[in-house]
Image (cartoon, rainbow, N blue to C red):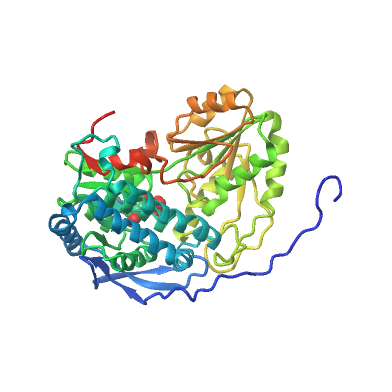
Amino acid sequence: MINGEFLMTFEYAPAPESRASVSIKSKYGHYIGGKFVAGEKHFRTINPATEEVLSSIALGGKKEVDAAVKAAKKALDMNWSKLSGRERGKYLFRIARILQERAREFAVLESLDNGKPIRESRDVDVPLAAAHFFYHAGWADKLEFAGVGTNAKAHGVVGQIIPWNFPLLMLAWKVAPALATGNTVVLKPAETTPLTALLFAEVCEQAGLPAGVVNILTGDGSTGALIVNHPGINKIAFTGSTEVGKIIAQSVAGTNKSVTLELGGKAANIVFEDAAIDESVEGIVNGIFFNQGHVCCAGSRLVIQESISDEFIKKLQKRMEKIRIGDPLDKNTDLGAINSRAQLEKIKDLSLAGDAEGAERWSPKCALPDKGFWFAPTIFTGVTQTHRIAREEIFGPVLSVLTFRTPQEGIDKANNTPFGLSAGIWSEKGSKVLWASQKLKAGVIWSNTFNRFDPTSPFGGYKESGWGREGGRHGLTAYLKGVAHE
Ligand code: ADP
């Protein structure tokens, strides 16, 4: 040890997770009414780390959407609405346990289709998905104690459209509360990541879930739009871009469909001069580089007090030099592949806008694989509030750094965004954390940590980040009508 620093570094030998637990069919149909039904048109899903074609996926059209909604309505009327909460809960408990039993298979499949590191799919996505089913299984027979009043009832058939950044986890956030409250489901996974949703169909079979309670339709935005506009759908739950969220809000205006939207973000991670620096550096890294920054609540703006900024950025750069990029199935990998070519182009375009508008770009030296979609972890310093990289969601491993002098200026900069999904506060002073958290306009605020998720805690946004909450007792109300206001 010299000057308090360890000089020894370790080279990590590759530690790839085996693909043996996963079997991928060459072609998939839709899961409708408890059966896989062949599709007419197809598209391909690929491994974004290698561009290897994984499978051919059915593209749902009007006929399939009609059939899925019909199956969900039949299951609701003939079966699901007649079951007690306790019976519904048993199915949810079974699903949760099967997800745990098949955890490795789900984690490997998720990393193959999405490009995220196995360390994250194994330790975050899959356990949290199971936890959402366990949590909501517990609510199914206790809804009368959830403070929702005595007239609360299921909406009926729920259309659910999810994105590609946490495919299985977003499915769990949607399906678990819908079933716990007595709804039946038509769910569409994103076009680049359909495989774990299709494997989930097998879990429904294994759990003995009555046919038609969960229907999985694959397809693209056109399939999503058909679900949104179908007259047999009583409620829409959407997670995705603010752009598509606005289209959905317009489509359901004037209908009696209920809607919840979980949209984009541009979260500020505010670091005050009295923060614990090393812990904050770790938190900032986790906030923006977790899941390649493909996180709607990612801490994509570092808003840092000027007095510590230079020292902090140096430490951050040093830490970023240690980020290991590469094979998502390698257990040592920290940063995996960008999910698609289209997303990579978007990240590149916005980063070029950062250069053009005068911000200063820095990335550690790192070798990126030749095949697949990759982007080095990047920070921009000297960012001002008018820069596009300070205002628009990049949805990639790119951090924009802004500075402030007084705490109030920090809050003003953090709130100067059309979004309001999440924020982070880094300070050793409890009174400052409480002061800042009251002033920040964001649905979720973490202090001295970031990107912590728990099924018991409501998640959702202000302003253009969306409508409604998911998770916790609040999230249940999104799936019930006639809820008493507290
Ligand atoms: P992202 O920008 O994260 O790719 P999108 O909002 O484009 O997010 O996609 C999220 C989900 O919404 C995907 O499942 C996609 O197929 C679906 N989708 C895209 N366009 C529409 C639309 N017009 N109506 C309904 N769903 C859509």
Task: Give residue 420's position: percent from left, percent from top.
Answer: 43, 35
Where residue 188 sits, quadrant-wise, is: bottom left
In percent of width and height, residue 127 lies at 46, 56
- Residue placed at 69% from the left, 49% from the top? 319
Indicate left or right for 112 with 425 as reference. Answer: left
The residue lying at 44 percent from left, 38 percent from top is 421
Q: Quadrant of the C terminus?
A: top left
The answer to whether residue 178 shows anywhere in this view is yes
Residue that sits furthest to the right in the current view: 2
Q: Residue 176, how many percent across, how many down? A: 32, 52
- Front-lying residue, 401 or 269: 269
Q: Residue at x 85, y 51 (%)?
A: 1
Question: What number of labels is visible?
Answer: 0
Relative placement, left or right, of 155 versus 450 is left
In the foreground, 71 or 393: 71
Residue 348 visible in the current orientation: no
62 or 466, which lies in front? 466
The residue that appears at 46% across and 33% down in the rendered structure is 417
The spot of residue 263 in percent (x, y) is: 38, 43
